[in-house]
Amino acid sequence: MGHIIYFHVEEWAKAIDYRHHVGVTAIYGDPAGTRLVFMDAKSKGYLYNAVINEVIPISDLPARLSVEGPSVKGRSNCISLRNKHHY
């Protein structure tokens, strides 16, 4: 149902395959890719640490989240957008 797959581009292979008990509806990752927050189909939030394969429920998650996009201090976490050159 809810699969989160870390893919290793250099080796062109799956690095980590986490299976959640219900569907995953949203994923918000950190720039290093070692941790992410995900929401499931039951509107519950979790912190996933890929390094140690640990999932921690987020207990005080607001009923409604306002997310304008992944950014840290105004910088996009999306490498393809961050490294975009305008010629």
Image (cartoon, rainbow, N blue to C red):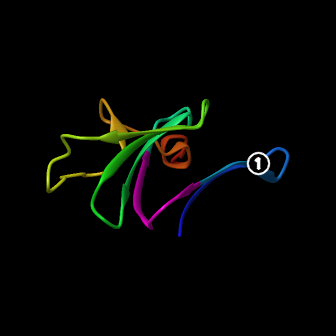
List x then y, in percent, for residue 11: 85, 46
Q: Residue at x 54, y 42 (%)?
A: 79
Most distant residue in the left direction: 63
Q: Residue at x 19, y 53 (%)?
A: 65
Most distant residue in the right direction: 11
Q: Amino acid at mark 1?
A: Val
In this rendered view, identify the residue nearer to me: 12 or 74.
12
Residue 61 position (above or below residue 24): above
Return the residue at label 1.
9
Quarter location, residue 32: top right
Residue 54 position (above or below residue 84): above
Q: Is residue 30 magenta?
A: no
* Magenta span main SS: strand
**How many neighbours does mark 1 have within 10 angstroms: few (below 14), some (14-19), or many (20 or more)?**
few
Q: How many marks?
A: 1
In this rendered view, identify the residue nearer to me: 36 or 68.
36
> Is 18 placed left or right of 76 in the picture?
right
> Is 70 placed left or right of 63 in the picture?
right
Q: Which residues are magenta?
A: 19-28
Q: Is residue 23 magenta?
A: yes
Quarter location, residue 47: top left
List x then y, in percent, for residue 12: 82, 53
Q: Residue at x 18, y 40 (%)?
A: 60
Q: Secondary structure at mark 1?
A: loop
In this rendered view, identify the residue nearer to me: 36 or 81.
36
> Is 23 placed left or right of 58 in the picture?
right
List x then y, in percent, for residue 15: 74, 45
List x then y, in percent, for residue 80: 56, 48
Q: Residue at x 29, y 41 (%)?
A: 58
> Is 25 placed left or right of 35 in the picture?
left
